[in-house]
Image (spheres, rainbow, N blue to C red):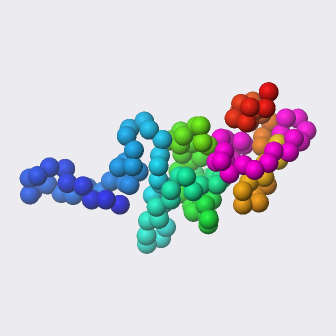
Amino acid sequence: MILEREGFDHGQELRPTSFVEHASAPGAALVRIAVRSMNRIVIVQVADIIRLEAEDNYVRIWTDRPHLHKETLTGLMARLDSAKFLRIHRSRAVNLDAVRELRPLSHGEYLMVLCDGTELTSGRTYKRDVHQAFVLD
């Protein structure tokens, strides 16, 4: 958390702002995410994210280790670069650079093998998005 002075008047208080606000211009994709963890704040570089998994109103962010972030998957996906991250299921998204292999399954689903060896199945409703992202048609 960064403390930022609202003005130069000594009577004004400092207010907390997140690292994310300082990371990019309004409307631009996130570069880093501040994840609160008990008594500390861990800064996760977006480029290091391999996959995202929804857990109710939280998102499990997988990098070299998992981080639990208090935000919905839909909310976080809206702030990430859509050219880098793809929603493949209602509860999962992947970093496109982390996908190493696609294995077609039935009904337009795919088994995706990621760089860390994780295997995820895409949902049928995301078939078109998967095809567009990997230029399969």
Nearer to us in this view, 68 or 30: 30
Nearer to us in this view, 113 or 37: 113
User: Who's the residue at 65% across and 53% down the image?
Assistant: 51
In which quadrant of the rendered view does residue 11 lie? bottom left
Q: Is residue 127 above or below residue 122?
A: above
Q: Is residue 65 above or below residue 127?
A: below
- Magenta stretch in the rendered image: 86-109
Nearer to us in this view, 122 or 90: 122
Residue 112 in view, yes or no:
yes
Residue 5 percent across, percent down from the top left: 20, 54
Residue 127 percent across, percent down from the top left: 77, 33
User: Who's the residue at 35% across and 60% down the image?
Assistant: 1
Q: Is residue 3 above or below residue 40?
A: above
User: Who's the residue at 38% across and 38% down the image?
Assistant: 26
Left or right: 109, with 86 as reference point: right
Residue 72 percent across, percent down from the top left: 56, 47
Residue 27 percent across, percent down from the top left: 42, 36
Residue 54 in view, yes or no:
no
Is residue 106 magenta-colored? yes
Is residue 92 magenta-colored? yes
Left or right: 61, with 38 as reference point: right
User: Who's the residue at 27% across and 59% down the image?
Assistant: 3
Q: Is residue 48 above or below residue 65?
A: above
Left or right: 106, with 100 as reference point: right
Q: Quadrant of the C terminus?
A: top right
Instruction: Return the residue found at the far right.
Output: 106
Instruction: Return the residue found at the far top.
Output: 137
